[in-house]
Every structure is written in structure tokens, then in C-alpha cells.
Image (spheres, rainbow, N blue to C red):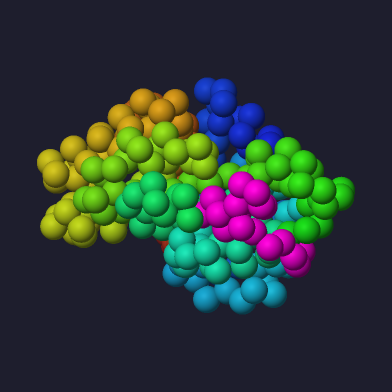
Amino acid sequence: MLTPAKQLREKLSSNETVVGVMATDHVWPQLVEVCQRGGLDYLVVDREHGAHSDELVAQVCQVARLAEFPVLMRTVSCEMSELRRAADLGPCGVVLPGVESVDQLDAARDALWMPPRGKRRPGGLGNHWMRDFHYETWRDEFELHFIVIPQIETKRGVENAASIAAHPLTTALGLGPYDLSADLGCCWQPEHPDHRRAVASVRAAADGAGKKLWMYANGERLDDGDTLLWIGEVAGILQQSFSKFVEQLKDK
């Protein structure tokens, strides 16, 4: 049973604020325990930009499964072979980068769901979620709970955000603000009118589908009412903490 994903979905169905972190530069198995003991709700292992081996990711996911803590994986792409491999490593969900159309989600469904609904060929540590390997068990105890967050990061994605949000595979709608700003021609100008309009459009698409919007967290974002948040990248948070402590000590 994909228990951590089931529990995370239950939080998402409420108005509870759900807070997680991204791990891009540094990932290690004990990070799962650090996140859990720190009160976070989930961890995203970033394979799109991070140089993490299959073996390391599988170990992190194994620790998370045993600890019943949600670990998602941001994949390199939405390609079928990439998503099949991702599921075999054992996360309880995926973040899909650069989604622009429902065709990509249809392909993702084929990669993540077993026949006859999909084309998945399961194996690896991902199989350890299962109590048996009958189709009905895959459908009811894995596929029903597996989390999928497509990221909107382009103008075309914004244009199709409503249909992407409404797709049955979509658990929550993600936003990639930096890449979106670059595609809009206002690279990392978050207050630019074009960027603000695009973000508002994506938020409206999520709301219209009854889905949460996955957002980077700061005070301004909380004012917008978003409750599915990530607070930054692990190495960046650690560096900020070092800087804060050093500044406090040297100012004394």
C-alpha cells in the first residue's frame, strides 16, 4: 500500500498547510529522517537538475517507505522510459517538469499504470510497496494514491493549464516560476505584469479543477491562499542557516 501518498492526499483534500522541501544539490538517505523530524510533510528528490544515481535515489525511497514519509521525484522528463524507471526506484509520486499538454499526461499515465489501463512493466524496489501483484492491488493500492504534479513552466503550458489541471492523473498543479518567467521574456522578474498574469491564470486553472497549486513558499505566497508549499532547496536552506548563525555571532 502506498500509505505515505495516501496520507499526503488526505492532507491535500483538507485546508491544512502542506510544507515540503526540494533536494537538488545534495541527497542522502538520512535526509528523510531530517525532514520527518523537522516537521516537513514531504521531500522532493530533484533528478531534473540533480546528479543523483539510481542507487542513491532507490536508497532514499526505501528509507522513506520504511519510515512512511512521502518522497516524490522530479523526473528529467515525461518520457515513458524515464517514468517507468522512476516508479521502479520507489517514490510515492512524481513532479513532471515542463508539462504543456494533456498528451504528455496521457503518456505519463501509460508509463505509470498497469495494463489494461496503461503499459507499465513494474520491477525494482518500487515493488516493495505491494502486498501482492494482482492487477486489482496495483490499481487500488498503488495507482489510486500515486501523486503526480505537472509543472507549468512555459507560455503554452499556461494556455493549456485548465485541461492539464483537470486531467485525472493530476493530483495538484505545479508552477515553475523561474522557467516560466524566462519563457515569457521577463526572466526572474516575478513582479512583471506578464508573469503575475500567468501565475494568476495557472492558479485559476487549479482552483477550477478543485486542485491545489504547488508553490514556492514565502509570506507573499501565503497571502494568496496557497497551502501546498515548498520552502526551498536543501543546500540553499543550509547555506542560509550558516550565514544567519555566523552573522549573529560576529555581530556580538
Q: Residue at x 66, y 52 (%)?
A: 115
The quarter of the displayed image where residue 145 is located: top right
The quarter of the displayed image where residue 240 is located: bottom left
Quarter holding the N terminus is top right
Q: Is 243 placed left or right of 42 in the picture?
A: left
Residue 249 percent coordinates (x, y): 49, 59
Q: Is residue 240 visible to us here? A: no
Main secondary structure of the magenta stretch: loop
Of 12 and 100, the residue lying toward us: 100
Q: Residue at x 64, y 29 (%)?
A: 10
Q: Is residue 76 above or below residue 195?
A: below
First to last magenta residue range: 108-125
Is residue 114 one of those drawn in magenta?
A: yes
Is residue 157 one of those drawn in magenta?
A: no
Q: Is 54 placed left or right of 80 in the picture?
A: right
Q: Is residue 222 above or below residue 64?
A: above
Q: Is residue 186 visible to us here? A: yes
